[in-house]
Image (tube, grey):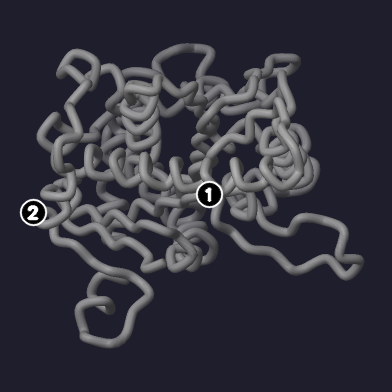
């Protein structure tokens, strides 16, 4: 993993902090989250505690405060030169990483902490799941076995969404995805209305693509990011977390007859375990190794988890 490489003494674009050293950077940032609130933000099988919030997320919140203030100073300089504008240009944060690594929990906790800054910024959160092609399209294109791979997303739609938000447009719509039915919800949208901060969470948000020959298109989703985070862990640990979650979902969400995976709730444990391992190996592991992991060096900040789901190190890109 990258942290092993960073410790070998070779020059690195990152400065790496052990957990104890990173936690000291919290300074006097107040804890504004209760245990009851955290329990509602925590994803299934994630072990994030208030201690983790204090030691990992509060220093990150302080860092982002400084970044947002710096970007705002740049905007103020532009308005001094160009003249005032009533558009709100959001600070956009991208969060990437494998399935089952804890991106959703990270995104929700970060959103809650950021919107409780003294300035009370408006913080919105979207996931790129909503920009997956509908199942009917994926089936027609033979891509259901690659759902979550870069080619399964409506990239032009996602790029247009981010372009509109970053341009300060109001009432920008993002399609809604249902994990229950495993598909886009027709005619349903989340509306993003000029937030101060937008968090974009997804598997492939740091993915690159070939440059367009005509020079007209914006090639990368990450071009719209002011700051990016990659949530990292050992492949064996992620695999274990994925299987554990799959087995637990059999007893919860999958029992709903409306669930796309309802059939998995009726099989025996051994068969379910084999099915979960197959889904990991055939789809999610391939996506991690071929598409997600190679984007890790593009992140501004890399948080690495140990086998116990706890953040062990934080690597921050040098400016």
Give percent across and percent down for residue 182: 57, 28
Quadrant for the C terminus, please.
bottom left
Pick whichever, 176 or 35, lies toward us. 35
Q: Is residue 80 left or right of residue 69?
A: right
Residue at the farthest bottom position: 10
Q: Residues within 10 Å of mark 1 (few under 14, many from 20)?
A: some
Residue at the farthest right position: 214
**Is residue 172 visible to us here?**
yes
The residue shown at (76%, 44%) is: 82
Q: How many labels, in total?
A: 2
The residue shown at (65%, 18%) is: 191
Q: Secondary structure at mark 2?
A: helix
Give percent across and percent down for residue 43: 31, 28
**Is residue 250 visible to us here?**
no
The residue shown at (49%, 64%) is: 298
Pick whichever, 249 or 271, lies toward us. 249
Relative to 310, residue 9 above or below: below
Please identify the quarter of the rendering in which residue 49 is found: top left
Give percent across and percent down for residue 31: 17, 26
Give percent across and percent down for residue 73: 52, 44
User: Which numbered disc, 1 or 2, marks the residue that appears first in the sequence?
Assistant: 2
- Tell me whether the residue at label 1 lies in contact with that at label 2, contact meaning CB atoms closer than 8 angstroms: no
The residue shown at (24%, 32%) is: 45
Quickly name the residue at label 1.
226
Pick whichever, 204 or 114, lies toward us. 114
Q: Which mark is residue 201?
A: none
Q: Is residue 277 left or right of residue 17?
A: right
Quadrant for the N terminus, please.
bottom left
Q: Residues within 10 Å of mark 2 (few under 14, many from 20)?
A: few
Quickly name the residue at label 2.
20
Report the Cα–Cα distance between label 1 and label 2. 27 Å
């Amino acid at each position: 993993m990258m942290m092993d490489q960073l410790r070998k003494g070779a020059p690195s674009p990152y400065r790496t902090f052990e957990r104890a050293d990173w936690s000291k950077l919290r300074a006097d940032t107040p804890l504004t989250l209760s245990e009851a609130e955290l329990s509602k933000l925590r994803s299934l099988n994630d072990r994030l505690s208030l201690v983790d919030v204090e030691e990992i997320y509060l220093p990150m919140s302080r860092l982002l405060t400084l970044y947002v203030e710096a970007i705002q100073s740049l905007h103020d300089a532009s308005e001094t030169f160009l003249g005032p504008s009533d558009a709100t240009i959001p600070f956009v944060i991208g969060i990437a990483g494998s399935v089952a690594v804890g991106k959703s929990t990270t995104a929700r906790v970060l959103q809650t902490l950021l919107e409780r800054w003294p300035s009370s910024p408006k913080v919105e959160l979207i996931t790129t799941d909503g920009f997956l092609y509908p199942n009917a399209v994926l089936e027609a294109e033979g891509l259901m076995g690659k759902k979550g791979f870069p080619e399964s997303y409506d990239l032009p739609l996602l790029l247009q969404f981010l372009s509109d938000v970053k341009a300060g447009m109001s009432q920008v719509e993002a399609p809604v995805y249902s994990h229950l039915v495993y598909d886009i919800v027709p005619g349903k949208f989340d509306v993003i209305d000029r937030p101060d901060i937008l968090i974009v969470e997804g598997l492939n948000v740091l993915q690159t693509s070939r440059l367009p020959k005509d020079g007209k298109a914006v090639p990368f989703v990450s071009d719209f990011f002011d700051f990016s985070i990659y949530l990292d862990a050992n492949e064996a640990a992620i695999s274990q977390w994925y299987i554990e979650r799959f087995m637990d979902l059999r007893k919860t969400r999958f029992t709903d007859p409306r669930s796309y995976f309802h059939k998995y709730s009726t099989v025996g444990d051994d068969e379910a375990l084999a099915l979960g391992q197959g889904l990991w190996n055939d789809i999610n592991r391939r996506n991690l190794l071929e598409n997600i992991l190679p984007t890790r060096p593009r992140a501004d900040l890399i948080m690495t988890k140990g086998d116990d789901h706890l953040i062990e190190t934080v690597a921050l890109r040098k400016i």
